[in-house]
Image: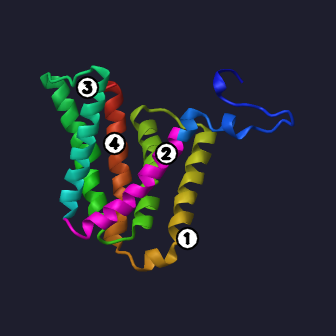
Amino acid sequence: MAGGVRTVAADGGCALSGCLTAWVRRLFLLAFIWGWSFLFIKVAVAGITPTAVAWSRIAFGALVLVAVLRHRGDRIPLDARSLRHFAVVALAGNIVPFSLLAWAETHITSALTAVLNASTPLYTAVLAAIALRERLRPAQIAGLAVGICGVAIAAGGGASDLQRSSAAGAAAAACTGLRYAIPSGFMSPHLV
């Protein structure tokens, strides 16, 4: 296929170097980083407060974004309208969910936190359908059902994790997924 998207071997199989395109490798890297973040949060909350963990994550993320913007020669818009939009997204998409997630990890395992946080795309799809007043197609409904089953199976697969967990911690982790989904609908018309 053109552009190095996929290389098909003579036997019809896929050559490994062609199947793992740059975007797939970046996706795996992102999944690795995102997955490990739950373990790092669990370790961090053993020594500092959940709020301090949340603010540390936000500060580190801000430093990275500023560095990327400077490298690209871009600037952060500082007009009042943009700052209001940034504040809404920061509160709904960073401050509240990061704090909830860190607090949740003081009451449940990092593995269970990661599984419950996997509900984010499910919440996003449902909220987008509601906000945009779009009817979900059967394939989308089936995808949501499979996703819900997947999260339930994965959460149930660690039955010992569930037995040692608090309901409030599990609820906080699940709500984090919802809190990540809410700003997605706001950002599209206001910041992208």
**Residue type (three-letter) at the residue carrying disc 4:** Ile
Q: Which mark is residue 182?
A: 4
Label for residue 157? Answer: 1
The answer to whether residue 151 shows anywhere in this view is yes
- Which mark is in front, 3 or 1? 3
Most extreme residue toward the right, as rendered? 11
Image quadrant occupied by the N terminus: top right
Q: In the rendered structure, which amino acid carries the disc numbered 1?
A: Gly
Q: CA distance from mark 4 to mark 1?
A: 28 Å
Secondary structure under tag 3 reads helix
Q: Within the image, what quadrant is residue 138 found in?
A: top right
Q: Give the label, 4 or 1, closer to the camera.
A: 1
Q: Which residue is mark 2?
A: 29
Give the amino acid type for the residue marked by disc 3 in the picture: Arg
Secondary structure predominantly adopted by residues drawn in magenta: helix
Q: Tell me, for residue 70, which label it has, or none.
A: 3
Please tell me which of labels 4 and 3 falls first in the chain. 3
Q: Does 71 sit left or right of 132 as displayed?
A: left
Q: Residue at x 33, y 66 (%)?
A: 42
Q: Nearer the viewer, mark 4 or mark 3?
A: 3
* Secondary element at tag 2: helix
Q: CA distance from mark 4 to mark 3?
A: 29 Å
For the magenta stretch, what is the residue range?
Answer: 26-48
Residue at x-position 23% and y-position 54%: 54
Residue 33: in magenta span: yes
Residue 70 locus on image (x, y percent) = 25, 25
Residue 130 is labelled as none
